[in-house]
Amino acid sequence: MFPILSRKVKGKDLVYFDNAATAQKPQQVIDALTSYYTGYNANIHRGLHTLADEATAAFEATRQAVCAFIGAAYPEEIIFTKGTTESINLVAQSWGSAFLKEGDEIIISSLEHHANIVPWQMIAETKGAKLRVIPIDDNGVLDMQAYKNMLNSKTKMVAVVHVSNALGVINPVEEIIHLAHAQGAHVLIDGAQSSVHLDIDVQSLDCEFFVFSGHKVYGPTGTGILYGKKSLLEAMPPYQGGGEMIKEVTFEKTTYNELPFKFEAGTPNIADFIALKSAIDFIKDTGKDSIRAHENMLLGYATEKLRAFKDVRIIGDVFEKVSVISFVVEGVHPQDLAILLDNQGIAVRTGHHCAQPLMQRLCIVGTTRISFAAYNTIQEIDAFMEALKKSLNMLR
Ligand code: PMP
């Protein structure tokens, strides 16, 4: 089902534990790409020929599928972007340029990926707004009292990660959203890590924006989602100008297209978005609940095995987390460990995980992170533990 998983690395069976960076793709996603290019490659919308009609229908079917996947009310609330990063930049630039004023405040958390820090810093600098950061404890748990104290009438946006990519910790987003709304602030949830593991219902969450990347939900790279509440998206100016996002252009004045096209200038990533529907179908057909149960079983098993290693310290060792384990080993640099593991066919991620401020807060240079997906197995965890033992013996 996942063809890549049968390959060898350095002569060993591949063990792929870097799923939080990107997930592998099921055959049906690869097939969808091939059948688009071999069967109906054409530019979408405005075409008056069969191939264009077929491509447009398949592309828009993905929008419907994403809408249902995250429980949005209307398909036009689903904007296609390059990825989580572009979705956040779009909101920061478009919403921020229209609605932020000098002295306004934006709240983020200490757990954020750089993609949910830098775009806010950029617009805050342009607008003279202030960025505030919710602190965490040593396990990566948000200090909710500090958050409550931070909220005030100047708070205009709260942008927080649903699940930390570096630690796997799940944030209490329902409460975060509720408290923000009580102050009249909008909320953006970075769902890059949560959308593949947790059930998402943006209507019951009631967040203004929810963003994620297709490549982390078993879909192609170059596909990103921005969900936004319709009334807000309608009030926001376009992010980029060009074809598709216009209604009428004259040299004197341009009127803009309706949602979602207002935010989709130029030819989009047609093939990859068409294939994204196959990825969503894979998750739906397998069942998010059964994927989550399987991943939790792997998480529990691996956590227990890792605890048996003396000198290994799990960071973010909390109950509310997804199948991500980040750890440090006393006296061992994560990079050295990754290289030794790769020599044994095991793919892990090491370093700061694009969360340098979090690493600074935790007083570490980085971690070794293993993360599990639907296709991982107990046998792979056993192979990993053996390889870890061997590697640590070599490093000492
Ligand atoms: N936020 C989080 C929590 C992430 O894990 C990632 C990807 N590592 C991003 C944002 C950025 O996603 P992308 O690189 O797909 O735009």
Image (tube, rainbow, N blue to C red):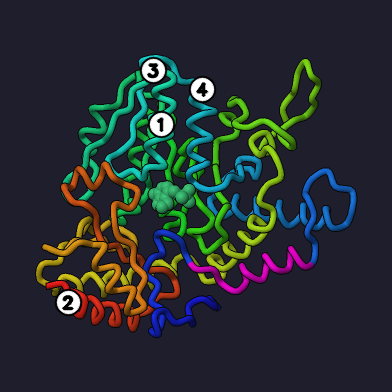
**Residue annotated with mark 3:** 128
| Secondary structure beneath label 3 | loop
Nearer the observer: mark 2 or 4; the answer is 2
Q: Which residue is mark 1?
A: 120
Q: Is residue 67 visible in this depiction of the protein? A: yes
Q: Which residues are magenta?
A: 24-38
Residue at (26%, 62%) from the top-left corner? Answer: 335
Q: What label sits on residue 97 in the rendered view?
A: 4
**Dot 3 beta carbon under 8 Å from ligand 1:** no
Of label 2 and label 4, which has the lower sequence position? 4
Query: In front: 260, or 269?
Result: 269
Q: Label the magenta part by its dominant secondary structure.
A: helix
Quadrant housing residue 306: bottom left
The answer to whether marks 1 and 4 mark residues whose Cβ atoms lie closer than 8 Å is no
Query: Label 2 sits on what residue type?
Result: Met
Label 2 sits on residue? 394
Q: Secondary structure at mark 2?
A: helix
Q: Counting residues from the N terminus, which is met first, the one under dot 3 or under dot 4?
A: 4
Type of amino acid under label 3: Gly
Residue at coordinates 26% horizontally, 41% vertically from top-left?
A: 357
The reply to whether the magenta stretch includes residue 76 is no
Tell me which label, 1 or 2, sits earlier in the chain.
Answer: 1
